Image (cartoon, helix red, strand yellow):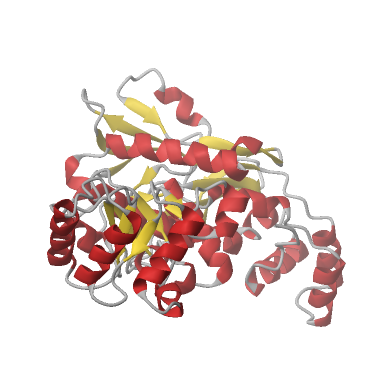
């Protein structure tokens, strides 16, 4: 991906910098924090996603000639501020929860230590990426948890815009989805891709049998045949007749799924196709997947629900200034106190308290020395430090980027999910699975 990301922001980020440069506060050392005050209704945990995409976008956050000319023509900021933007390179530090990690209300997900101007200009970019990607990952993780080990493929590209489709496939894969139908996501992020044929391919041919034969000639007997274009029972019979009992799988995209799946399994077994698998792809979400937990389904395909966050299209994260230095060079905690929107000021470090079974019981947020202070938790065997450095003095840690970063995040997610208490996986309404405690 190429091109500047500098204008993927709100106008007021630049007008704040303009005013701060004018009154001399733009260079005050500051600490910004991205966090969620609460989880979406019904959620008991969230999953962090999008950090790697943000870091890649940060590497291209430059105001080139085209961006500066637009700002000049629109008179967004003064000429002196345009000069500052022309030289902009982020030079601060960024810490945060690694991608794939679970989070809870108040978790300091991303901490940006820089001048006020350098930190505030990143707000919209950070939130637009993390809110969308974490929403998808959180929904995907719930689906994976109720699939009981059966693979799920992401296939929602047609239900969101073209760029969001690639990002959503990435986030879902981090949270445990096995594959995606989106080829660009496969190319850019190294995600396994899948897909065979839609109803249009069957309708193209003079008969269902002709369509199945054509697909088998192209893809071999291990392919998946879509059996519900016409009559499902007839589709199963035709599929086995044409492909033989070694057919890889059949796909069902309609009907009363628990009933239909059971009937298809019984029919396949009667016909001798006992190893032919069944995949279902009909407007699934975590609730429908859970309802199929006792059905002989071998895999799932999810589209609309996962790419839209299954009812929570944004994760509800905010980005606030939580500390700054005063004129004497001392750190001062700052916080918003508005009703229902209060924040907790101060520089923070975070750890998760685990019991003797390595089950998470508490999110501990210590207000003190700030990001990097997690090392103090290492001596306590019950505490697992949560934040890691992403950017140091403007240099991005490349291990979080690209396909390697996705693999690292997927591994982190698997470990984080194993730590969550059993109540985290309930789909009904309830509070966060573990409490967040502030100390210091």
Q: Which residue is at a point 59% across and 58% down the rendered structure image?
A: 184
70 left or right, relative to 108: right
Identify which residue is drawn at 66% across, 74% down. 11
The quarter in which the C terminus is drawn is top left
Vertical side of 218 occupied by 254: above or below: below
Residue 47 position within the rendered picture, expressed as x and y whole percent measured from the top left? 39, 49
The percent coordinates of residue 141 (x first, y second) are 33, 50
In this rendered view, identify the residue nearer to me: 127 or 26.
127
Residue 37 in sight here: no
Q: Give the residue displayed 17% in from the left and 56% down from the top.
A: 265
- Residue 237, position as x, y percentages in the image: 23, 64
> Depth check: 438 or 25 in front?
438
- Using the image as rendered, state which of residue 231 and residue 94 is in the foreground: 231
Q: Is residue 188 left or right of residue 364?
A: right
The one nearer the camera, 86 or 278, is 278
Q: In the image, residue 54 lies at what x, y percent?
A: 60, 53
Q: Is residue 380 above or below residue 215?
A: above
Splitting the image into 4 quarters, where does residue 416 fall?
Answer: top left
């Amino acid at each position: 991906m190429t091109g500047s990301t500098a204008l993927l922001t709100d106008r007021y980020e630049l007008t704040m910098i303009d005013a701060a440069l004018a009154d001399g506060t733009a260079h005050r050392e500051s600490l910004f924090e991205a966090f969620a005050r609460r989880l979406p209704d019904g959620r008991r945990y969230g999953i962090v996603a999008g950090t790697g995409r943000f870091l890649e976008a940060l590497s291209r956050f430059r105001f080139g000639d085209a961006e500066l000319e637009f700002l000049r023509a629109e008179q967004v900021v003064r000429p002196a501020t345009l000069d500052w933007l022309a030289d902009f390179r982020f030079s601060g530090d960024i810490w945060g929860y690694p991608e794939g990690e679970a989070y809870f209300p108040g978790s300091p997900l991303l901490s940006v230590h820089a001048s006020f101007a350098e930190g505030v200009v990143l707000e919209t970019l950070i939130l637009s990426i993390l809110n969308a990607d974490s929403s998808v990952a959180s929904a995907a993780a719930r689906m994976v948890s109720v699939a009981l080990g059966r693979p799920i493929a992401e296939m929602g590209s047609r239900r969101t815009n073209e760029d969001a489709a690639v990002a959503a496939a990435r986030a879902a894969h981090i949270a445990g989805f096995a594959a995606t139908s989106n080829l660009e996501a496969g190319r850019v992020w190294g995600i396994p891709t899948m897909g065979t044929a839609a109803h249009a391919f069957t309708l193209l041919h003079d008969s269902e049998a002709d369509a199945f034969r054509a697909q088998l000639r192209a893809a071999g007997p291990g392919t998946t045949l879509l059996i519900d274009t016409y009559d499902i029972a007839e589709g199963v019979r035709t599929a086995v007749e044409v492909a033989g009992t070694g057919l890889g799988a059949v796909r069902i995209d309609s009907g009363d799924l628990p009933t239909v799946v059971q009937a298809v399994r019984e029919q396949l077994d009667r016909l001798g196709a006992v190893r032919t698998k069944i995949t279902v792809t009909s407007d699934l979400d975590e609730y429908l997947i859970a309802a199929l937990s006792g059905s002989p389904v071998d895999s799932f395909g999810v589209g609309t629900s996962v790419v839209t966050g299954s009812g929570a299209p944004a994760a509800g994260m905010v980005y606030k200034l939580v500390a700054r230095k005063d004129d004497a060079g001392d750190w001062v905690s700052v916080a918003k106190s508005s009703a229902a929107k209060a924040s907790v000021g101060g520089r923070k470090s975070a750890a998760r308290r685990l019991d003797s079974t390595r089950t998470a019981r508490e999110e501990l947020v210590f207000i003190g020395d700030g990001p990097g202070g997690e090392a103090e938790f290492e001596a306590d065997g019950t505490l697992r430090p949560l934040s890691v450095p992403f950017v140091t003095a403007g240099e991005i840690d490349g291990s979080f980027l690209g396909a390697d970063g996705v693999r690292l995040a997927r591994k982190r997610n698997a470990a984080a999910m194993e730590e969550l208490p059993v109540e985290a996986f309930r789909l009904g309404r309830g509070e966060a699975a573990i409490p967040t405690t502030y100390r210091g």
